[in-house]
Image: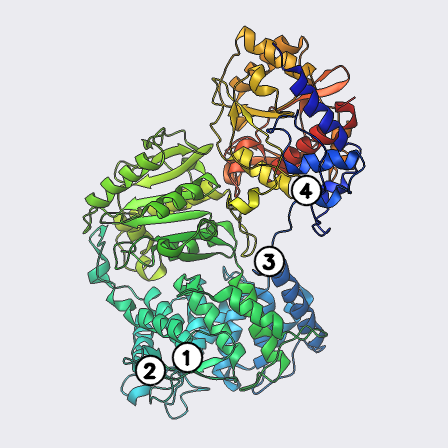
Amino acid sequence: MIKCCNRRRWRNLLGLLVCFPLAVFVSTQVAAQEPASSADTSTVPVSVLSQPIQQLVSARLGSNPPEANWIAPRRQQDEALSAEEVRQSIKRGVDFLKGQQNENGSWAQCSFSGDTTALCTLALLNAEENPQDPAIQNGIRYLLALPRDNIQNYVVSLRIMALAAADPAGEKYRREVAADVKRLLESQVPAGKGRNVGGWSYGLLQSFGADASNSQFALLALHEASRMGIKIPRENWLLAQQYWQACFDEPSGGFYYTADGGDVRGSMVCAGISSWIIIQENLADVANEFGDDRAVCCGNNAALKPVDRAIEWLIENYTVKFNPVGRGGHQGSRESVLYYLYGMERAGRLAGLRFFGPHDWYRDGSKELISRQNRLEGSWSSTGHGEENANVGTPLALLFLAKGKRPVVLGKYKHTDGQNWDRHPKGVHFLTERLAAQWKQKLNWQTIAAENASVDDLLEAPVLFLTGVQQLPMNRLQKDNLKAYLENGGFLFAEACQGEGCDGAAFDRAFRQLMVELFPDSALEALNPGHPIWNAHYPLLPNAERPLLGLQACCRTSVVYCPANLSCYWALDRPAIADVAPARLQARIEYCAQLGVNVVTYATGRQLKEKGETPKLIADRAELLADRVLVLPKLSHNGGADDAPNAWRIMLLNAQTTGLRIKLEKKMISPQLDQLADHPFVFLHGRSGFSFTAQQRKDLRAYLDAGGFIFADSICSSPQFSNAFRQEMKVIVGEPLQPIPPDHKIWSEEFGSRIDQVTLRTRDSKVPGGFQSSLRRPELEGQTINGRLAVVFSPNDLSCALENTVVSQCNGYTHEDALRIGTKVILYSLLSDSNYQ
């Protein structure tokens, strides 16, 4: 017997909704009111009528107004800094600097000829201003006219950095940079000249004095020149290492301003971290890094010990409000705080740390800088060493904000203490540099500690890199978070450090078992030569020496695993090694680097987000479920009805932002009338062929006749599912699905923002990223019953796009457009007058 009464009740109740404008659902500004008294609803099923609908019914009968009760509770404002706030702050700073530039291209100097001009030009370039912008071009022309022998080392160093930022390949300014490099090398204190050996001061030797500030700028410049392809002799890097070792304070772990000792300051600790990392990058330890044609992996990382100690100092003395001073104390100086923050950005970025201890240095520093910004001018200034001058303070602040907000492409997953989780610390760093060069995009990487990382923290990185040699000591929460990360669009890239000096058999066993535990219905299998990873950027063939295994989860290959060393070879992908590596070793380095680039390109599609724009997972907490009433279930069938398990939940979360009260819990129902009757709306998707029974078809037709609504999409644009769904609907309704025309009111402003154009992605191995994107009208099909649109179907993928917040590897819509389309269909089905006549 058909449960007509129940079906009529929810149909009539939903019909009441159309009496109220859509603004009721999309507004989030009305304050909550006391619940309205409800009418007698005892004859209505509880599954349909929870409290808010009862209140709406009683309002319809003359009780209190319903609007406030239908608005989803306002979430507490997220205090995290948004990317838009940072962008606007940077824009105001950029506008200020451009307004301060003189007609000859200079900025009024602070201490030395060209000092502010070099600093401001560098800041504008790092703020993503076009190198051809007149302000930048005029600044460069002024800098190039400065006589090399009559300017200070600060200016020489900044000029090198500015020219390298404007011309990273060295196609235009290589000669000028090379000449400045020669000047810097001549200014370095030579061996045998006291404790300042290897350092720099303001000018040409000056009685062989040196300080850590001049020295860090010289190293930053030499590093950029090296990246441009200009050779820096090994002995100069060794001398620089000797100087920074002399400035290192072993008891505290900090660095002095001079090799003579004194106070340990935060700005100099940051300078020491950056300088030490740069020196190690540009030195090749032939004896310990490779032998013959293979890398020596899992070696000793003692060379980075001063960096680890200095990071501990920063954690202990952490602040963004002043420049900390002292040995282990929390003293501080208000002087040079902008210089200190600029140093903190470099230290955090080069060390790949999103956090110093529990502190999110970039967000903390950005909040502090935005609070300090002059609201009228857009400038910054402080006290001490030139920072009173806004032409010094503003570029320092811009360098922090702009360089720190670069997209994070890789996150190193710290799953344990010690070295097991990171046997090749520089591997991910150099892979990121290779990615940045190939994609022509400035990128960051960071370390994420499993011990205290939430799923939101994991989602900061579109690709999580997990490596090791020993067991994986992960607890239940960490495993659950890792699985949730993958289900919400994340990608896991893992390696076992095996062979070539490593014994990673224990890690290999543990990782394989972890994948079985997390994804029992999927298996790690060798990627066949036709997999898009092999051509994602470089054309590669599988290599038995370093095989790639993949695991299918969440609409794509979400896990890629190499049971052999990769990061060890990434760490060798740098000029210092290229100069001395034999050809067969260089070939292995190149293959591993290209393989890493391909995996990350496949995982991200080069679609990255700035800090503050990373996806967030909203917890299914009880308070979020309070007073939700609509249950929008998924329909079971035998064609992969739950193959994208998180897609529908993501859609419902987005629909909640319109003000709809939706219960987020997952509910699967069978195509039987006694289960269908309680729901005005059902969703189904799949990735393979399927069929309903004769009775199920009869029940589905009765459901549609009674006012039910079916929304479907084809997972990964599966032709098998699409054909099966079209055939089933033709049998059930008696008519084939028809394209929904572009002038149909489903696309109008009546149901949220109008949709005229979306992006459809189709696989094309000939274009970067493997997909061709085209702008077009959304392509949906529908069936009308008695003048009412009752079935909506997308043959182009929505579900995989929803699950993969970075980029889907399926033909179909983008994540953002999938959200727009899905929310539009939900609102139309529930609010359209024509659906409830």
Q: What is the CA distance from the residue labelled 4 to the residue labelled 2?
A: 58 Å
Q: Does dot 2 land on a helix, a strand or a loop? A: helix
Q: What is the CA distance from the residue labelled 1 to the residue labelled 4?
A: 50 Å
| Residue name at image x 35 percent, y 78 percent | 254
User: Looking at this view, is 288 or 422 the one in front?
Assistant: 422
- Residue density around tag 1, few if under 14, some if 14–19, many if 20 or more, within 10 Å: many
Check contact, mark 3 vs mark 4: CB within 8 A: no
Q: Is residue 475 left or right of residue 135?
A: left
Residue receiving disc 3: 83
Residue receiving disc 4: 658
293 up-or-down from 94: above or below: above
Q: Does dot 3 land on a helix, a strand or a loop? A: helix
Q: What is the CA distance from the residue labelled 3 to the residue labelled 4?
A: 23 Å
Give the amino acid type for the residue marked by disc 4 in the picture: Thr
The quarter of the picture where residue 659 lies is top right
Residue receiving disc 1: 268
Q: Position of residue 349 (x, y in %)?
A: 44, 64
